Amino acid sequence: MRDRIVRLLVATLAAFLLALPVASLRGNSSTGFTIVWTPAFVTAAMVLVGGAILFAAVEAQRRGTAFWDARAATDSAVGRRRPCAAQAWTLGVLVATVAALPLLGLPGAWTKLLLETMVFATIAVGLQITIGMAGLLVLGHAAFWAVGAYTFGLLTVHQGWNFWIAFPAAGVAAALTGLVIGLPALRLRGDYLAVVTLGFGEAVRWVIKNEQDVTGGDANLPGNIVPGSFRKPMGALGEWLWQPAAVDGRTFEPGTVQALIDRECYWFALVLLVVCVACVHLLAKSRVGRALFALREDETAAKCMGIDTTRVKLVAFMASALWAGLAGVVPAVHRGSINPEMFDFNTSVLFVAMVVLGGLGSITGSIVGAALLWMLPALLANWFPEVQEYRYLFFGALMAAMMVVRPEGLFGGARRKGAA
Amino acid sequence: MTPLLECRSVTKRFGGLAAVDDVSCVVEEGSVTAVIGPNGAGKTTFFNCVSSIYPATSGEVRFEGVDVTRLAPHVVTRLGIARTFQNIRLFRGMSALENVITARHCRTKAGVVASLLRLPSQRREEAESEAIARELLAFVGVAKWADSAAGSLPYGDQRRLEIARALATEPSLLLLDEPAAGMNPRESQDLVELIRRISKRGLTVLLIEHHMKVVMGISTHIVVLDHGVKIADGTPEAVRNDSKVIEAYLGKEDVT
């Protein structure tokens, strides 16, 4: 009983924290995130929170578990299945509502924050494939993100490639990098693998820093290369080229071009996230996904059940890196500049934290984890500038509390080693 | 006729210790062969060599005439050797049904792309795997646990689930490592019944077992190991009366 109350509290807190930023969507982009209630946003917030509750309730009904049991809303390894019609509709409404937010006059600061959150959510969901499903701890995931972003940047800026060719190329480059790092890492497990991937992540960052002629080094890509065309709105996405923020001495006027770009990138990131979630969900339910879960549960047994663990691990590395690479395109386009410090070790750790906080193997959890770990610090820093210095303390406490209360993560299944 | 499984001078050394020392034996198709011996006799190590978890230091394991000594475990499984484990090694966090479906891996082929696009061939394969898995769960008698986490099943049923999982790989040779360990007399009687039914399905069974009742009840052939060395090999009657076997189990007769 006590266990349930704790879970109820945690779930409520999570829901509250999620609803908070959504319910307060009104602000001046120049002064940050202020809270002003408007009918449109209150409605949107109610739809989002209501939808989430409905989804969880239907899921609880299907599983026959208590509604407040956070596991009820999850998709962990046990009994993963297709959403029923009611859930599919709910999900549709949720996504549509999120997509409609910019049209309701979402301020720039919020658009940016949500956009970044969706990028991180995409990466975290992709990282579930290696950490959550296959149980391989990867501590250098930011490197794949960097490979995607730089591949995209270099191809569009130096080579003048079309967006729609450079975008998949970024994903492919990251996936191939995943293969390259996966090969030597195959024989390693647990801590050793973590150390190797950590080293790899740092190596990639230092290559980017040192190869100044190509990447611009510590200065942003692309150094002084300026393509001729102006960055175009969504209608002409086909000709959309990456470009630095200032062209020919002109700067973007706040609220006009920048707002357009924010909005395009927002929708692009949303579509990417939805596709990523769909793919990872289908993967998890598939033959390959089961092999990955089996690998996590017991590698020896998996081998003896006919699973080629070498191959499956490589698939995990590549698939996971692919999503990070694709997600790397968004900041490159949106910020108009990328630099190696965006992809440092802290970022890799942040990704792992998102996955662990959300719960291993849970897609819902990764998204919630990304939202909590990316939005909360930004909002807190904005609303309470004086506590910003303590945010690592805050996160340390949060993670420690999580490990005590729910070691399996917010949405993780009740999987504990040695559970009878 | 070539025997289903033939081991020639199989030896496995861990440093100076020969856990399995020059063991040769054959397992005839359709037989139920038991490997017995005191604790530490090298029975599980022998199994690990046959299923290629680690390759034999020297010697040769031939399955259906093919040398499988140094093949990867998953290749050996695909060729038709499946096994269970002495310490149950289920995929604990996955449901019982998923455990069995997972073992269909080497008999199915839907790749990542087919799965993401949910191609008709992939759906058909999934449906087929699930049907086979449910049939196997019913066959070993754990159908009611299909949707429960494997780790939460009662002990005896976990052992049965492991057998169902091994059967899902469509083996022709099934290795059972102490399937009756920790079972009460009634459960082990049920297990003997289950092994008989498996044998009737046309599978050859090779099992390690301590329960003499189980061993004598079902085996057609017995191999006895002691300190890594094969000390006897024959029908249950012959083995039961073998002086070396009696000595290994009960100690040397003191004749003074």
Image: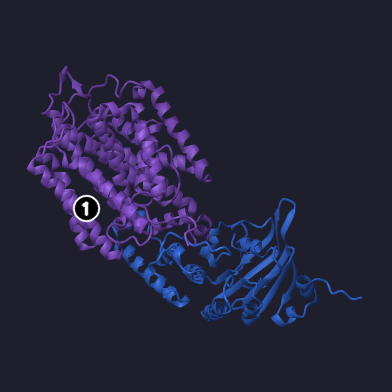
Chain colours: A purple, B blue
Q: Position of residue A420 (x, y in %)?
A: 48, 62
The residue positioned farthest toward the left in the image shown? A39
Q: Residue at x 52, y 81 (%)?
A: B197
Please tell me which residue is depicted at 60% across the width and 76% down the height of the picture. Answer: B29
* Placement of B231 over or under A304, stated as above or below: below
Outermost residue on the front side: it is: A2
Residue count near mark 1 (Cα–Cα under 10 Å), binned few <14, some 14–19, many ≥20: some
Residue in the image at 36% along x and 54% along y: B112
Indicate whether B8 appears above or below A339: below
In the image shown, does B19 or B192 lie closer to the viewer? B192
Image quarter where the N terminus of chain A lies is bottom left
User: Could you say where residue B111 lies in the image, as x and y percent from the top left?
Assistant: 38, 56
Could you tell me the amino acid type at mark 1?
Ala
Q: Is residue A218 above or below residue A278?
A: above
Circle 1 SS class: helix
Query: How many numbered marks appear?
Result: 1
Extreme residue in the right direction: B256
Q: Residue at x 44, y 30 (%)?
A: A202
Look at mark 1 in the image and give the residue it sits on: A52
Left or right of residue A203, residue A16 in this image:
left
Task: Say whether residue A224 is visible.
Answer: yes
The subunit carrying tag 1 is A
Nearer to me, A169 or A327: A327
Q: Is residue B53 shown left or right of residue A107?
A: right
In which quadrant of the rendered view does residue B136 lie? bottom left
